[in-house]
Amino acid sequence: MKRIPEVELERIRAAVDLHRIVERHVDGWSRSKSNFARGDYWACCPFHGETTPSFHVDDGKGRYKCFGCGASGDHFKFLMEKTGCSFVEAVEQLGGRSEPEPMTPEQIAADQEARARKRNERERKAETFRADEIRRSAKIMDAGGRVGGTEGEAYLRGRGLLPCPVRLPLRFLTHYQYWHQRDVPGRKKPEPYVLMSAPAMLAPITGPEGFQGVHITCIDPLFPGRKLVIEDPEHPGEVLPPKKIRGSKRGAAIKLWTPELFDRLVIGEGIETVLSVLVAELETDRFSRTA
């Protein structure tokens, strides 16, 4: 197999956004999960059948990953796996040269400097965006109030999660602005707008830096215990997620309760799921102490 210099592969990755390659093989991007401004794309996986988008493309890193079937890779691997072409053919399809002309030491140094500059600029923009997101999420969390006596309490009670014998870090927001995106004629990228206002339960996301974000659950005030069903007005039949995260998830988690003494860590997916375990164990412990 021909050996293609890494500098040529890097040139291709920098010149071609990965999502441009993938979008030819997926049935559109999920507007509810994707963040186009950040180069963050989600779709139903092109490698296995599914109805909920679990296939993620990160333009910044030039990588894709399916959280359903585990498929992952870069520009070249995607084409090889999806079209059955060879590595050299994938390089050529993306405008690369399987036998590129040798570069002078000066050209190599200039190319490496340009790539490093682009990488640093990308990382700087990402950190700026991350810091802004954390500030915005802090404002949402600060706007929340006590859960007791609100639709938030009715939601938790309807899920069988009350009474809870310990203090939880949850808050309630009467009017959470639910942002969405819509297509605008003449524009390449969708326009963000406030779709609706809804009552929401808030949970802080914390990590090594302290507060890093907020987890938001839009609830249905008419049906205690149910999350709000939000239909996409731009795409009839598509239901938008009632849960959102603002801020940064990097190295972070939602910590519901930390007892003074404990000998194990309980981790789960979903606040309600973990809280149900917490309530069940505390109730069992209370019953054993009073029996």
Image: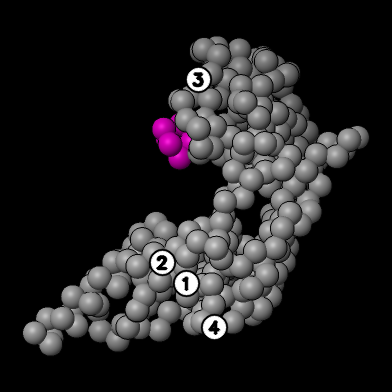
Q: Position of residue 24 (x, y in %)?
A: 66, 22
Query: Circle 1 — which element?
Result: helix
| Residue type for callout 4 | Arg
- Would you say 217 lies left or right of 91 here? left
First in residue order: circle 4 vs circle 1: 4
In this rendering, the answer to whether 27 lies above or below 198 is: above
Query: Circle 3 — which element?
Result: helix
Query: What is the C-alpha distance between the residues marked 3 and 2?
Result: 47 Å
Mark 3: few, some, or many residues within 10 Å (few <14, many ≥20)?
some
Q: Which residue was labeled with disc 1?
A: 154
First in residue order: circle 3 vs circle 2: 3
First in residue order: circle 4 vs circle 2: 4
Q: Position of residue 253 (x, y in %)?
A: 46, 66
Q: Which residue was labeled with disc 2?
A: 158
Residue 276 occupies quadrant: bottom left
In this rendering, the answer to whether 284 lies above or below 82 is: below
In this rendering, the answer to whether 39 lies above or below 268 is: above
Query: What is the C-alpha distance between the residues marked 2 and 1?
Result: 6 Å
Q: Which residue was labeled with disc 4?
A: 146
Query: Circle 4 — which element?
Result: loop
- Would you say 184 lies left or right of 266 here? right
Q: Nearer the viewer, mark 3 or mark 4?
A: 4
